[in-house]
Amino acid sequence: MPEHVAIIMDGNGRWAQRHGKSRLEGHRQGVENVRRIVKASRNLGIQHITLYAFSVENWKRPKSEVSALMSLLNIYLKKELEELLQNGVRLNVIGRIEDLPKNVQKTLLDTIEKTKENSQQILTLALNYGARTEILDAVAKYTSLVAAGKEDSAELDWETFSSCLYTHNLPDPDLIIRTSGEHRLSNFLLLQAAYAEIYFTQLCWPEFLPEHLLEAIEDYNSRERRYGQTGEQIKEVKKSISPA
Ligand code: FPP
């Protein structure tokens, strides 16, 4: 099982259009699917699930759609709290949450606080998230540590820099799934995706069911992750782990 699955939940609008429904109804169905897929991922024993729920670019959408998305998010978090607590799920957020509406920030912080002792699964929501913004924030954080004499720039390495990213407490994603037939990462976890396997499906987010998650995982399991090594080297490593 991949340890960390990250999902770009795309296609709520197109799903709605195809079914003669409003975009808002598409997002509502999208939230229903968040429930289904988070539950399925938990049952499969996936330790980390990260969902791209709102990007820094999404503010460009019509005001009414942005506020509908914020309101759906707020309702989702409030409704889901009991489920998260019962199942040992910890909520984590990546992104500039200080720019989200105050009521959403309050619900997020409240949910994070109430679930902070949980460790069965970490559910990370990317909200007002953009990878380039994340990199800028990490540089700002790192340079402030240098200015305070806590870091020496001559010794900068990836471990130190990645500890300044929003994802400092998460492993890199093993598998990134994007729904709706688009083949791009759209500013999502660009640095953390360095060695991730990427899976694209034509299905729109509301129709991406647990059985499709399983298909994505089967596809992931059929791939060979080499991290810059040769296939032969990987076979040797695998043999040394399981000599049978
Ligand atoms: C993409 O569909 C989806 C989004 C921009 C938002 C994803 C949000 C949700 C599923 C609901 C809120 C999230 C949580 C965690 C409760 P689109 O509108 O871009 O679809 P389109 O490209 O077909 O128009």
Image: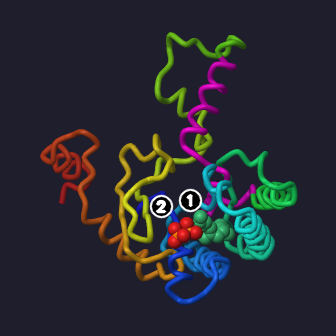
Q: Is residue 141 magenta?
A: yes
Does residue 192 appear to the left or right of 35 in the view shown?
left
For residue 86, which quarter of the picture? bottom right
User: How packed is label 1: few (under 14 Cα within 10 Å), some, or many (20 or more)?
Assistant: many
In terms of sequence position, does the residue under pointer 1 or pointer 2 come before the other? 2
User: How packed is label 2: few (under 14 Cα within 10 Å), some, or many (20 or more)?
Assistant: many
Residue 216 position within the rendered picture, expressed as x and y whole percent measured from the top left: 37, 71
Residue 215 position within the rendered picture, expressed as x and y whole percent measured from the top left: 35, 76
Q: Which residue is mark 1?
A: 50
Given residues 42 and 188, the one toward you in this image is: 188
Q: Which residue is mark 2?
A: 5
Figure quarter occupied by ligand 1: bottom right
Q: Which residues are magenta?
A: 116-145
Q: Is residue 191 magenta?
A: no
Question: Is residue 96 visible from the viewing direction of this image?
Answer: yes
Which numbered tag is attached to residue 149?
none
Q: Residue at x 69, y 60 (%)?
A: 90
Question: Does 103 appear above or below 25?
Answer: above
Q: Amino acid at mark 1?
A: Thr
SS of the residue at dot 2?
A: strand
Q: Are marks 1 and 2 in contact (CB under 8 Å)?
A: yes
